[in-house]
């Protein structure tokens, strides 16, 4: 899965989506686009400049922690 994540540019896509959405929606949109393009599973954690976070996954589980 890691190679698909890198080839797709999941982190880059999530950061680009921060221009339009907050972190939670950017994470959701990035994972949806990744799954549509690759048919693979992944997760992403997004943090904006103000420290707001968002996380999304299409896997069975993914550990996250926020304050």
Image (cartoon, grey):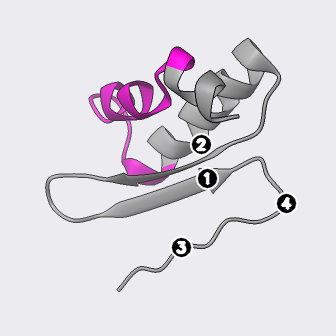
Identify the mark nearer the N-term, 2 or 3.
2
Front residue of 14 and 40: 40
Residue indicated by mark 1: 56
Residue indicated by mark 4: 60
Q: Position of residue 54 (x, y in %)?
A: 45, 58
Q: Label 4 neighbourhood size at 10 Å, few (<14), some (14-19), many (20+)?
A: few
Q: Residue at x 57, y 33 (%)?
A: 29
Q: Are marks 2 and 4 in contact (CB under 8 Å)?
A: no
- Which structural element holds mark 4? loop
The secondary structure that dominates the magenta segment is helix
Residue indicated by mark 2: 28
Between the residue at mark 1 and the residue at mark 2, the CA separation in whole angstroms equals: 5 Å
Front residue of 48 and 35: 35
- Which structural element holds mark 1? strand
Camera-nearest label, 2 or 4: 4
Between the residue at mark 2 and the residue at mark 3, the CA separation in whole angstroms equals: 15 Å
Quarter of the view holding residue 37: top right
- Which structural element holds mark 3? loop
């Amino acid at each position: 899965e890691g190679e698909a994540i890198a080839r797709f540019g999941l982190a880059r896509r999530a950061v680009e989506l921060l221009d339009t959405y907050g972190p939670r929606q950017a994470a959701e949109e990035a994972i949806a686009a990744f799954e549509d393009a690759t048919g693979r599973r992944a997760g992403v954690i997004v943090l904006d400049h103000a420290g707001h976070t968002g996380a999304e996954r299409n896997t069975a589980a993914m550990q996250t922690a926020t304050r």
